Each structure stands twice: as structure tokens, then as C-alpha cells.
Amino acid sequence: MTTQQVTEQNFEATVKEGIVLLDFWASWCAPCRAFAPVFEAAATRHPDAVFGKVDTQSEPGLAAAFQIRAIPTLMVLRDGVVLFSQAGVLPAAALDELVEKVKALDMNEVRQKVAERSKGTPQAQPAE
């Protein structure tokens, strides 16, 4: 499988289900260009995951929504839940290991932990 462009228009549908790796990048970024073939090769090795590329210049809204401060940034989601985010280039072996760890996760357990954390977070009260 090859990588696909992820935009604000297709973002929700792309990350809704399954494992999605997002590469936030820009064409002027030398480390981004160096990481691109590693990311592309991983996409062929892991056809059961979606490998998406978010051009931060074309999609500033997505970059802002995920508070991207440096590129490249790799983000991994599963079933719409962000599980990993790291700026910088990952070597191929580390990328493969990350995909395998995400595949092995029990998402019911992850959702339960997310729910528990959100219960402890004070909710904003509407102004009267």
C-alpha cells in the first residue's frame, strides 16, 4: 500500500477506524524529505495500516489542531485515539516496532484508561 494525502476534508474518515500513521511534513523540510522514503517503505510492509501524509503548508488547520511545533512529526492513531506523537525522524526498525506495538494493544483497555483520565479532568462550565 502507498501513502495517502490527508486533508481536513478526509481526516475524520481516515482516522475513524484501524491503525493510522500520520506524517506531518513540508516540502521545504530536509529531514521530512529524508524520512519520506522510510515512511513509504513502511507503508508497503504494513498494508493493514493507513499511512497518511499531512502537508503542514497546505493543511495548517490540521497542524494547529494537533499542535505540531516541529516537522517531521509522526502521529499514530488507532480507532480515532491518538496513541503516539513524536517530532523527528524514526529509523525503519523503530517504525516497524511501533506499528507492531500498536497492533498488539487492547483498545478496550485503552478506551477505559482514556475515560478514567477524562473523569479526573475538570470540565469547563458554561457561562451564565
Image (spheres, rainbow, N blue to C red):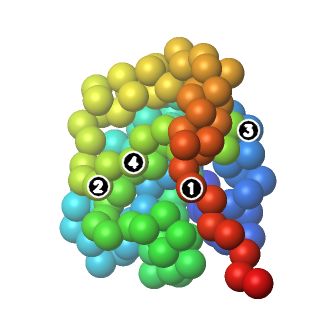
Amino acid marked by disc 3? Glu
Real-space CA distance between mark 1 and mark 4, rounded to the nearest whole angstrom? 24 Å
Q: Secondary structure at mark 3?
A: loop
Residue highlighted by disc 4: 85
Q: Is residue 87 visible?
A: yes
The picture quadrant where one finds residue 127 is: bottom right
Quadrant for residue 101, please give it: top left
Name the residue type under label 1. Answer: Pro
Around disc 2, counting alpha carbons within 10 Å, would you say few (fewer than 14), some (14 to 19), or many (20 or more)? some
Residue 69, image x and y in percent? Answer: 32, 70
Q: Quadrant of residue 110?
A: top right
Circles 1 and 3, Cβ within 8 Å, touching? The answer is no
**Which of the image's four quarters has the N terminus?**
top right
Q: Which residue is mark 1?
A: 122
Reading the image, the residue beneath label 2 is: 87
**Residue 50 visible in the picture:** no
In 3D space, how far apart are the residues under numbered discs 2 and 4 (Cα atoms)?
7 Å
Residue at image position (46%, 20%) is 100
Q: How many marks?
A: 4
Label placed on residue 16? none
Question: To which residue does mark 3 refer?
Answer: 17
Task: Compare residues 103 and 6 and report the one nearer the observer.
Answer: 103
Secondary-structure class at tag 1? loop
Instruction: Tell me whether the residue at label 1 lies in contact with that at label 4, contact meaning CB atoms closer than 8 angstroms.
Output: no
Of the two numbered discs 2 and 3 on the same chain, state the one appearing first in sequence: 3
For the point 43% across and 62% down, which residue is it? 24
User: Who comes first in sequence, dot 3 or dot 4?
Assistant: 3
